[in-house]
Image (cartoon, rainbow, N blue to C red):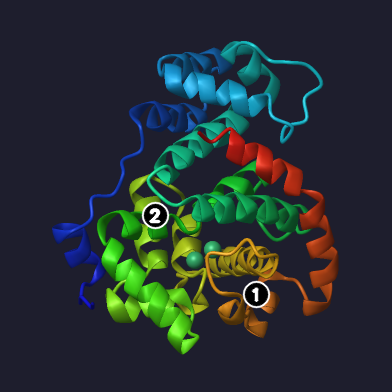
């Protein structure tokens, strides 16, 4: 089964991208506005009760490692600050989007978020990004797969079969079966959600650095490719192990060397508990 879409025809004819909840858009606007206060942000969260509950669950997870329980949104915002809260709102939104996908993809994406956090922590000088933002980005990098699965399940199945049969990466198989791959589609979603140009470009280029529009996106896309690799090699893949290779240019562009791999892997294994916990609370 093959189709031959380009990204625009796919979005015109088949796919409706999930929209960012208005509460999250509002929170993002507030966080970016210089004169907004912590209580403005808290109010915007409280206006969306489902988001408020999820925010509190995440705040109280071991991932944030707080020593006492936080029971109010006001307290959460005061304690963690606006930027962290914005990332929490995005995390909750991405989790909602994932419920349309398979459990394996959720596990892969959360693991990639955790791996991104580790990678960015080791390279603060390279990226203008904090660890929570890195987590959200890792969580989001394969979001295009969920959307493809939702709207073109048969074609996605054919792409998996082709990837396995020919031992080619899944994104290549998606391109030959559908005409568009999950990276391109995910990048459109990131654009629609108002994420930065760097993040939009890095999603587009996480399997192919040539698709990155600038150097900052290139570094971030390469870092994502390494996070992806760490997860795939640990058996938490969305791709076959045999096709989960990583090119030398990715290591270079991310500012790491292949020899860093064992240490990174060790740190990743040390964080697997938080993966399980985050998955549990995503529902
Ligand atoms: Fe991917
Ligand atoms: Fe991935």
- Camera-side residue: 132 or 66? 66
Q: Are marks 2 and 1 in contact (CB under 8 Å)?
A: no
Tag in front: 2 or 1: 2
The image quadrant that residue 244 belongs to is bottom right
Quadrant placement of the N terminus? bottom left
For the residue labelled by badge 1, is the local secondary structure a helix, a strand or a loop?
Answer: helix
Q: Mark yes or no: residue 121 visible.
A: yes
- Camera-side residue: 162 or 32? 162
Question: Residue 246: where, in percent of width, then height?
Answer: 63, 79
Question: Residue 177: where, in percent of width, then height?
Answer: 29, 78
Question: Residue 191: where, in percent of width, then height?
Answer: 37, 52
In the rendered view, would you say 218 is above or below 69? below
Q: What residue is shown at x 54% (from left), y 17% (from top)?
A: 37
Residue identifier under label 2: 146
Q: What residue is shown at x 63% (from left), y 77% (from top)?
A: 250
The residue at label 1 has a CB less than 8 Å from ligand 1: no
In the rendered view, would you say 115 is above or below 25? below
The label number, if any, that marks residue 253 in the structure image: 1
């Amino acid at each position: 089964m093959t189709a031959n879409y380009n990204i625009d025809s796919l979005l015109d004819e088949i796919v409706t991208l999930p929209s960012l909840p208005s509460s999250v858009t509002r929170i993002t606007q507030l966080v970016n506005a210089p004169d907004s206060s912590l209580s403005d942000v808290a109010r915007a969260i409280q206006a969306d009760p489902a988001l408020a509950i999820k925010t509190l669950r995440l705040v109280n997870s071991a991932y944030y490692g707080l020593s006492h329980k936080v029971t109010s949104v006001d307290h959460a915002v005061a304690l963690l600050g606006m930027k962290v809260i914005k990332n929490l709102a995005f995390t909750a939104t991405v989790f909602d989007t994932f419920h349309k996908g398979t459990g394996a993809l959720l596990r892969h994406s959360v693991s990639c978020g955790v791996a991104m956090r580790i990678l960015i922590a080791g390279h603060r000088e390279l990226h203008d990004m904090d660890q929570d933002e890195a987590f959200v980005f890792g969580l989001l990098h394969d979001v295009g797969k969920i959307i493809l699965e939702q709207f073109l399940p048969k074609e996605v199945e054919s792409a998996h079969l082709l990837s396995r049969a020919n031992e080619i990466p899944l994104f290549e198989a998606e391109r030959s079966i559908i005409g568009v791959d999950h990276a391109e589609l995910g990048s459109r979603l990131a654009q629609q959600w108002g994420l930065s140009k760097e993040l939009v470009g890095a999603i587009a280029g996480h399997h192919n650095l040539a698709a990155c529009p600038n150097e900052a996106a290139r570094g971030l896309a390469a870092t994502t490719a390494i996070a992806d690799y760490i997860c795939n090699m640990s058996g938490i893949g969305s791709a076959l192990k045999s096709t989960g290779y990583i090119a030398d240019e990715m290591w270079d562009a991310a500012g790491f060397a292949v020899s860093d791999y064992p240490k990174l892997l060790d740190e990743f294994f040390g964080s697997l508990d938080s993966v399980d916990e985050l998955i549990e609370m995503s529902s």
